[in-house]
Amino acid sequence: MKIEHIDSSIIERKKLVCPWQLAPIIDNRLRPLVHNPQKIFAPYVETGMTVLDVGCGAGFTSLGLAKLVGEEGLVIAADLQPKMLSIVKERAVRAGLSNRIRIHLCSPERIGLQEEVDFAVAFFMVHEVPDVRTFLEEIYELLKNGGQFFVTEPIIHVGLRAFRQLMREARDVGFEITGRPSVRFGRTVLLVKLE
Ligand SMILES: C[S@@+](CC[C@H](N)C(=O)[O-])C[C@H]1O[C@@H](n2cnc3c(N)ncnc32)[C@H](O)[C@@H]1O
C-alpha cells in the first residue's frame, strides 16, 4: 500500500506508549550513571517552584526534581498509566519525598491540569503523544510567563528531522528556544514562554 493511501489517524494510533511493565528496565540501576536529574535540572529549578513532570513514567526524574524544589515546592508527576503513577507514589514515600510529589492522571489527549507551573519537563515522552501540537499548546497555557519547558527525546526513537519538526511546532505555538542542553542519548531543547 502506498503511504498516501494510509489514513493518517492509523499512523497516529501506531504511536505506542511505553508500558508500565518496562519501568524496571527504564529505571535500571545504571541509569543514574547516565542521567542525573538533579544535575540536569539544577540550572532551571529553584526551591519553592511548582514543576510539571509530564510522562513521568516510574518517576526517575520526578524524584530528582522533588529534591530541587525543596520543602516548599511541588512536583506534579503526570502520566496516563495509573500503574506508573502508583510506582511513583511508592517511590516517593520510600524516599521521604511524598509531601513534595503529587501524582496526576492524564488522558491520552489532555494533561488536564488546572494550575500554572513554573517549569515543565517532558523526558523521553513527546514521541508517544498522539497530537504534539495540542500537547505543546497545553503546556504553553500551563506555564507562567517566563516559564521554561525542557524537552528531551531519545535519539534511538527520534531522528534529527523529527526533532527539528518538534522545535518548529514549538515556535509556532509561541515558544522561544533558549538553549540546547546536553542530555546523553537525547535530543534536547529548552523552550521559554514569553508573552
Ligand atoms: C519512555 S517513558 C519515559 C518515562 C520517564 N519520563 C523517564 O524518562 O523515565 C514515556 C512515558 O510517557 C507516558 N506518556 C505517553 N504519552 C503520554 C501522554 N499523552 N500524556 C501523559 N503521559 C504520557 C507513558 O505512559 C510513559 O510512562
Image (cartoon, rainbow, N blue to C red):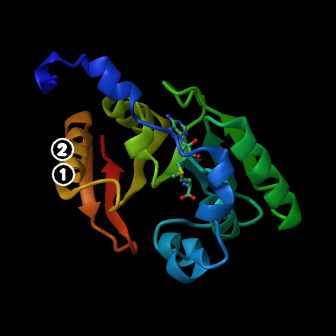
Of residues 116 and 75, which is closer to you in this image?
Answer: 75
Is label 2 in a helix, a strand or a loop?
helix
The percent coordinates of residue 120 (x first, y second) are 49, 50
Residue at the location (18% across, 44% down)? 168
Of residues 65 and 74, which is closer to you in this image?
Answer: 65
The residue tagged 1 is: 164
Q: Nearer the viewer, mark 2 or mark 1?
A: 1
Cβ atoms at labels 2 and 1 below 8 Å apart = yes
Q: With 164 as the anchor, is 178 left or right in this view?
A: right
Is label 1 in a helix, a strand or a loop?
helix
Question: Which quadrant, please, contains the N terminus?
Answer: top left
**Residue 22, located in which quarter of the rendered image?**
bottom right
Q: Is residue 84 visible?
A: yes
Crowd band around label 1 with a 10 angstrom C-alpha radius: few (<14), some (14–19), many (20+): some
Q: Is residue 48 visible?
A: no
Residue at the location (39% across, 31% down)? 14
* Mark 2 beta carbon near ligand 1 (under 8 Å): no
As measured in the structure, the alpha-carbon distance from the residue carrying label 2 to the one carrying label 1 is 6 Å
Q: Amino acid at mark 2?
A: Arg
The residue tagged 2 is: 168
Of residues 50 and 52, which is closer to you in this image?
Answer: 52
The percent coordinates of residue 71 (x first, y second) are 77, 63
The percent coordinates of residue 77 (x first, y second) are 65, 47
Question: Which quadrant, please, contains the C terminus?
Answer: top left
Q: With 137 as the anchor, is 96 left or right in this view?
A: right
Above-or-below relation of 173 to 120: above
Of residues 99 and 29, which is closer to you in this image?
Answer: 29
Crowd band around label 2 with a 10 angstrom C-alpha radius: few (<14), some (14–19), many (20+): few
Q: Amino acid at mark 1?
A: Arg
**Residue 132, located in which quarter of the rendered image?**
top left
Residue most extreme to the front: 1
